[in-house]
Amino acid sequence: MKLLKFSGNLLAPALEEPLSEVMLDDWRANRQAHAGATALAIPNDASLGDIVEDLSGFSTVILTFPTFKDGRAYSQARIIRERFFYTGEIRARGDVLRDQILFMTRCGFDAFEFESGDANDALGEFSFAYQASADRVEPVWRQRLSRAAAA
Amino acid sequence: MYRYDEFDATIVAERVSQFRGQVERRLAGELTEDQFKPLRLMNGLYLQLHAYMLRVAIPYGTLSSKQMRMLSAIARKYDKGYGHFTTRQNIQFNWPALVDVPDILDDLASVEMHAIQTSGNCIRNVTSDQYAGAAADEIEDPRIWCEVIRQWSTFHPEFSFLPRKFKIAVTASDTDRAAVKVHDIGLRLHKNDAGEAGFEVIVGGGLGRTPYVGHTIREFLPKKYLLSYLEAILRVYNLEGRRDNLYKARIKILVNSEGATTFADMVEAEWAAIKKNEIDLPAEEIDRIRDYFAPPAFDKLPETSAALEERRNSDKDFARWLRTNTHEHKTPGYAIVNISLKPIGGIPGDASDVQMAAVADIAEQYSHDEIRVTHEQNLVLPHVKRDDLYAVWKALDAQALATPNIGLVSDIIACPGLDYCSLANTRSIPIAQRISERFADLNEEEDIGELKIKISGCINACGHHHVGHIGILGVDKKGEEFYQITLGGSGAEDASLGEIVGRGLSSGDAVDAVEKLIGFYRQRRQSGERFLDTYRRLGAEPFKEALYEAA
């Protein structure tokens, strides 16, 4: 398995450090038994209503794309970043494709279990984005305002 | 109309480059068809029965003459000399070669057009009232909000892999020409008691194999919160919509399984949590977009045109076309002109390259450079001086574009059906042609009055048969084409779903059945009643009896 990490607008291959993973259900069933876990794996049909209590203490959250068409984890990542202000790593697992990594970074993912080599080309395909999202990229409307103010 | 600034232009140009790379990888054999499929489907390129089909977005149905000329040129250069206007205000080209598609997209980008999100499980082209900006009864131009939604939804990172496709329609009139109650989200701009404008938010309408009329989940949403509220709806749908069954994945299934009230509560809770994020546009940006939709500089004209009245009295054919194909404009001395793409015996929604070029010229000369596409598969010239109507009629008639049948029997919606579509069970176009030929007598059509016939070649209902006053659904029974009739549907402000009447009929019997139903209506109608009104007054039974008694 290959791992790419995103920082400073670049994807770079990362060494796979051993993660101690726990599934959300197992964690909730017995927190003490999993006290040493460093990564929380959240299924894409899990309700995130009270997830904030679970997040603290984990340096990695793993979200899953069972197939590339199943886009629930995009919403989960944004909620975890924007509502619960989680600052650790959010890792994408499963059917992670070159042409979707840009959407994933925009939603707050910053690590990818990605088999197919480099995906930096795909990240650079668009210079602008219309909407604000978890990546704090300045949306087009804000750039228009700044430009109008400067003019 | 809206014009791209450098941000819009860059995004569209980069999309074309990205797709060109994907096509090159496919042609070089680096991508298999399976790997290429999800990429081409993000850009409106389908593989149909006989060839690729490219669906081009016409945002909220608005075209300039320059854009229409480009569609004409593409039809001539890359297709077989025609294009097909669809019920979603798009145009489809049926015969492009894969290797040419990036060049077609470049040509489109040069006139500020694209094929972004015309397929795939994402937010599709936003549709609207074809009379927007011209209708006397609108609160404001709904296209301002369509453009706001277009930008927000373009490459939305969270909502590009929804459970299923997602369609939004916007109207700002009491008369609903955009079918907002049968969309995933319908937005109706109206005024509250304080005189402020806001949106009624209708969710979970739709046709397909499980048709529903949408539910209002919010009576009044202040305009400034439009995008955050939409984002809340889409997030609830993305997380909670079914993904285990393709046919139960639309938002209508979620809304109806949760119940509209519970669904509304889920949306309101999500909205409360995200409202403070910077999703909604500041007033300056909305004003910037609004400025593009400022009305053209209309002349100050008298209400009536003496030249027009003289022609009306002396030319019966012109007078008939005025009655059926023109509509009141909000500005004195102007009219809205409907261009029928339903010639008797023709293919609904098709236009040749020559016709498209002619419409572009006529619009440039007589309609402030603007053309609209309607969800009923016709075109509109929104701003024509009444003094010019005779010249416009003559020019349209010379291109077989003046069939006086808007809203009448032969103004039929039909899906492409088995002549093109890989999903269809039966053909639709030949049924439409035969009904149209059966009612070729325009006097008879006018006497019958408003009648909406809608034909789908399979249960996916692209021909909107559920909301036809008379709907026709093609079904395949052991390799034979049968047609099932539904009655009493409407996609307008009085939305309702048609009821199935009786067994499936052969194609010939289906055309006879339409004639019988219309005959019965003419016997039993009361003064001023449309077919739909008579049906609603009498109920299904007498119509069923009329249909089957002589059979």
Image (spheres, helix red, strand yellow):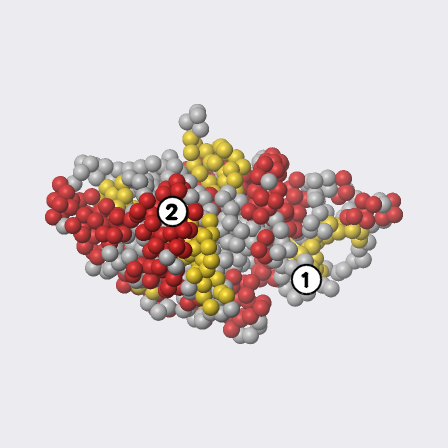
Which residue is identified by label 2? B2
Residue B509 placed where, x, y %?
Answer: 38, 62
Q: Residues within 10 Å of mark 1 (few under 14, many from 20)?
A: many
| Chain letter behind tag 2 | B
Vertical relation: B52 (above or below) B129: below
Residue B178 placed where, x, y %?
Answer: 41, 45
In the drawing, does residue A146 fall left or right of residue B65? right
Q: Secondary structure at mark 1?
A: loop
The residue lying at 63 percent from left, 47 percent from top is B239
Which amino acid lies under the numbered mark 2 shown in the image of this protein? Tyr
Q: Residues within 10 Å of mark 2 (few under 14, many from 20)?
A: some
Residue B289 placed where, x, y %?
Answer: 41, 42
Q: Quadrant of residue B427?
A: bottom left
Q: Residue furthest front?
A: B549
Q: Quadrant of the C terminus of chain B?
A: bottom left
Residue B475 placed where, x, y %?
Answer: 48, 62
The residue lying at 55 percent from left, 47 percent from top is B252
Q: Residue furthest right?
A: A33
| Chain letter behind tag 1 | A
In the drawing, does residue B329 fall left or right of residue B490? left
How many labels were placed on the picture?
2
Question: Could you say which disc has been placed on residue B87 in the image?
Answer: none
Q: Nearer the viewer, residue B63 or A110?
A: B63
Question: Could you say which disc has been placed on residue A114 in the image?
Answer: 1
Vertical relation: B353 (above or below) B296: below
Which amino acid lies under the numbered mark 1 shown in the image of this protein? Phe
Q: Is residue B502 visible?
A: yes
The residue lying at 61 percent from left, 49 percent from top is B241
Do the residues marked 2 and 1 share a common chain?
no
Q: Nearer the viewer, residue B291 or B51?
A: B51
The residue lying at 42 percent from left, 59 percent from top is B415
